[in-house]
């Protein structure tokens, strides 16, 4: 079975704040029994200060799902909603002394429930992706509905694009078959509707796992990419479904080698600052550590750390820097 | 607290008598069975004995119909690839949706690489094969029918002897993955028309890493592993003599305990099952109530998740397993339970208790002691449970 930390076991066997909360005024329900995970998070929020006075949970799920839910309640009690919104799923995992990688989606469920509960309190609508068909990618908790939407909205036709837009397939890639089937199916439907040219559509067997993995390695800079086709994962730095902010055009002066170190650092700082909102949106962050020649060291934090998306994030930053500064940069997470 | 081991369909404890039989073959009896000298001859003799013991357990007509392999998975692969190669003018395979991954993964691969068309026959709510669909899939294009003798998760038994006869009518080869059945139910191959049968040592108190493929005399056969002339050229590689001897001994012991398995062990299983259903609301037995392995008990507990139950059981010193996704790292519950159309609310919470001849009354008592409390605790946490002993969800399954 799984190698759970003592704290995970303790929170599973002796869950804190379990059960219904009678006077809850913020309730978040996420997950679906079909996925084997469901969580109802109930908060009692003091309306004026927006402080979370009490929190309880009910969870259908495995050991780490129950432990994560319980940990979440411990973490949010006493926080204001604004503070709570800053939490990421990584905070839950860290609090528990880590979760097995395959179980990270349990912490994501906690994160989502919190977002949902706060949205409920504020009278906003929160969209739960997990009820739209089967969960395709377990590494990133991406379901069929989300992949379908991304493929349609953005006319995606390769697996790498799907990964860049949804994260699905960015990790172990055991979801390859499912992603492939979904992409082929949606593309076929788009062709039938006249939304996509037949020759562009992805067909089953159009690529192999090995090719996708190789491209991912290239995107991460582990190996040199062949000269021409640019890996899509690197081309689209952000993996959110929201409109992707256009990469600014290359700096007019394109000062190449003639740039002063100070100016270089400023530009790098600027680039990272531009990307920060998107990283935050995904529960992560990135800080500049050092610039040495054409090597930029950055520190990833929050959900970006250890996340399989780190490499995609890094290659995203790399691409932006290259576009902005007009010269290639290597971004190294430290 | 002595641990209670009820996960025998996963693997069994090696019988001490099996260990004892194997030991000399690591030390003084180290010869290569293919060698002409006395060292080799002694080992060759022991392998012959093992072959006869397996022959007896399977009711095979000839001892040379037994081919030793590295286990059930290798036996399954050998049978499938052999059939496709031996009948080159046929390119279809008939199997079921509830087979072990050792069969399903090979079939998926053959389908993906375009080497074979695969018919995957469905099952009903009890896990019984859809016979109409099976008959409909049979045609002269079928090279091989491969259907399990008994299901590893639910214990449901397929009537393989009859299914084999239907396969013969269209000239297809018939293979059965009998890894779970061998040693638990009587098998008499000579009075059947089954062409090939897979078995595995560690499911019947033998060692791991050894198995056998029964190949009926006269069956067209192509080896999977080529090289030396071992196993009459049907499986190359120096014989794993200690393991083969162990498997032989395990087969002899299984034959001797067959009656116990079908009476005493079955009664233990039935008592556990009845006790659970009686004490715990909203649970039901998965699998065919009538035609099922005597040792297997699979119960679906609604509105809780299997891994959570297993963690509690483990803490109480009880080993079982679950058809839940979360123990395997996948997100879909067991393909077997899904094929049986067990609703998600229950499939995620299915627990398999599998007995062996080493279990006793005390084991059943221990499980019955702790289960109600575990279910109470987990259901109290579940958003699908309203605490009044009734599901809060609108969903109401039909109890089969
Ligand atoms: S399951 Fe999708 S990347 Fe691992």
Image (spheres, coloured by chain):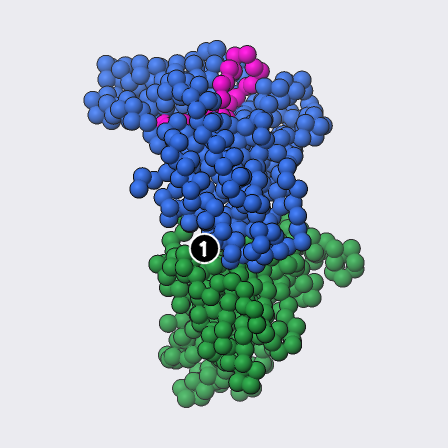
In the picture, measured across the screen, residue B279 lies left or right of residue B256, that is: right
Judge whether B228 appears above or below B355 on screen: above
In the picture, measured across the screen, residue B270 lies left or right of residue B123, that is: left
The residue at the far right in this view is A193
Q: Which residue is painted at 58% across and 27% down in the image?
A: B290
Q: Residues within 10 Å of mark 1 (few under 14, many from 20)?
A: many
SS state under label 1: helix
In the picture, measured across the screen, residue A241 lies left or right of residue A221, that is: right
Question: Which residue is at the front of the view, B166 or A81?
Answer: A81
The residue at the far left in this view is B28
Q: Which residue is painted at 37% across and 34% down in the image?
A: B362
Q: Tell me the magenta residue range.
A: B177-206
Q: Is B93 included in the stretch rendered in magenta?
A: no
Q: Which residue is mark 1?
A: A63
| CB at disc 1 and ligand 1 closer than 8 Å | no
Judge whether A206 appears above or below A142 on screen: above
Judge whether A118 appears above or below A64 on screen: below
Q: Is B179 included in the stretch rendered in magenta?
A: yes
Q: Colour of chain B?
A: blue
Q: Which residue is painted at 46% across and 82% down in the image?
A: A268
> Quadrant where the C terminus of chain B lies?
top right
> Quadrant where the N terminus of chain B lies?
top left
Answer whether residue B191 is visible to the viewer in this image. yes
Q: Which residue is painted at 45% across and 30% down in the image?
A: B268
- Give the green chain's letter: A
Answer whether residue B111 is visible to the viewer in this image. no
Please identify the quarter of the rendering in which residue A167 is found. Answer: bottom right
Residue A8: % across, % down = 40, 59
Question: Which residue is at the front of the view, B38 or B96?
Answer: B96
Callout 1: chain: A
Residue B156: % across, % down = 56, 30
Please identify the quarter of the rendering in which residue A232 is found. Answer: bottom right
């Amino acid at each position: 079975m799984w190698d759970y930390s003592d704290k995970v076991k303790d929170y599973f066997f002796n869950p804190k704040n379990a059960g219904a909360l009678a006077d809850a005024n913020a309730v978040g329900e996420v997950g679906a029994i079909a996925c084997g995970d469901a969580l109802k998070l109930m908060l009692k929020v003091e309306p004026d200060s927006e402080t979370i006075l009490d929190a309880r949970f009910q969870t259908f799920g495995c050991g780490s799902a129950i432990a994560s839910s319980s940990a979440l309640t411990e973490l949010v009690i006493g926080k204001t909603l604004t503070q709570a919104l800053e939490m990421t799923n990584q905070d839950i995992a860290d609090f528990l002394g880590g979760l097995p990688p395959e179980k990270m989606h349990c912490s994501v469920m906690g994160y989502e429930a919190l977002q949902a509960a706060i949205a409920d309190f504020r009278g906003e609508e929160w969209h739960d992706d997990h009820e739209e068909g089967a969960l395709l990618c377990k590494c990133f908790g991406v379901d069929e509905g989300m992949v379908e939407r991304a493929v349609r909205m953005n006319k995606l036709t390769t697996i790498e694009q799907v990964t860049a837009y949804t994260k699905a397939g960015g990790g172990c890639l055991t979801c390859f078959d499912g992603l492939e089937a979904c992409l082929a199916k949606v593309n076929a439907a788009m062709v039938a509707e006249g939304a996509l040219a037949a020759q562009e559509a992805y067909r089953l067997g159009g690529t192999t796992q090995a090719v996708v993995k190789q491209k991912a390695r290239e995107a991460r800079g582990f190996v040199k990419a062949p000269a021409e086709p640019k890996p899509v994962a690197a081309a689209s730095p952000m993996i959110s479904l929201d409109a992707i902010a256009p990469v600014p055009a290359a700096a007019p002066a394109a000062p190449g080698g003639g740039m002063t170190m100070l100016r270089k650092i400023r530009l790098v700082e600027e680039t990272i600052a531009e990307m920060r909102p998107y990283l935050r949106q995904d529960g992560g962050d990135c800080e500049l550590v050092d610039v040495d020649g054409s090597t930029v060291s950055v520190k990833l934090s929050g959900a970006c750390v250890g996340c399989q998306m780190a490499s995609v994030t890094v290659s995203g930053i790399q691409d932006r820097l290259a576009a902005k500064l007009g010269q290639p940069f290597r971004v190294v997470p430290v | 607290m002595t641990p209670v081991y009820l996960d025998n369909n996963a693997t069994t404890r090696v019988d001490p008598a099996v260990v004892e039989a194997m030991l000399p073959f690591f030390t003084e009896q180290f010869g290569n069975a293919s060698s002409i000298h006395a060292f080799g001859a002694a080992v060759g003799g022991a392998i012959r004995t093992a072959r006869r013991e397996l022959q007896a357990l399977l009711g095979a007509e000839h001892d040379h119909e037994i081919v030793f392999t590295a286990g059930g998975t290798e036996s399954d692969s050998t049978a499938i690839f052999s059939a496709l190669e031996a009948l080159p003018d046929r390119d279809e395979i008939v199997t079921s949706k509830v087979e072990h991954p050792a069969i399903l993964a090979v079939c998926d691969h053959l389908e993906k690489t375009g080497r074979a068309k695969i018919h995957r026959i469905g099952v009903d709510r009890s896990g019984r094969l859809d016979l109409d669909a099976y008959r409909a899939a049979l045609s002269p294009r079928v090279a091989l029918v491969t259907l399990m003798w008994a299901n590893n998760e639910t214990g449901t038994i397929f009537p393989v002897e009859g299914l084999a006869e239907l396969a013969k009518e269209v000239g297809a080869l018939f293979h059965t993955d009998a890894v779970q059945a061998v040693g638990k139910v009587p098998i008499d191959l000579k009075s059947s028309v089954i062409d090939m049968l897979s078995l595995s040592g560690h499911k019947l108190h033998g060692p791991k890493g050894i198995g056998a493929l029964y190949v009926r005399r006269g069956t067209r056969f192509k080896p999977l592993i080529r090289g030396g002339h071992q196993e009459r050229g049907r499986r190359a590689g120096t014989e794993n003599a200690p393991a083969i001897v162990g498997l032989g001994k395990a087969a002899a012991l299984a034959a001797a305990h067959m009656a116990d398995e079908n009476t005493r062990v079955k009664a233990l299983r039935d008592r556990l099952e009845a006790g659970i259903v009686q004490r715990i609301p909203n649970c039901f037995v998965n699998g065919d109530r009538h035609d099922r392995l005597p040792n297997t008990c699979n119960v679906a507990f609604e509105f809780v998740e299997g891994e959570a139950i297993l963690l509690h059981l483990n803490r109480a010193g009880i080993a079982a397993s679950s058809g839940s996704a979360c123990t395997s790292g996948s997100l879909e519950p067991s393909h077997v339970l899904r094929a049986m159309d067990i609703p998600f609310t229950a499939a995620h919470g299915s627990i398999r208790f599998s007995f062996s001849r080493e279990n006793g009354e005390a084991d059943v008592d221990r499980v019955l002691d702790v289960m109600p409390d575990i279910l109470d605790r987990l259901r109290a946490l579940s958003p699908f449970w309203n605490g009044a002993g009734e599901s809060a969800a609108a969903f109401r399954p039909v109890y089969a």
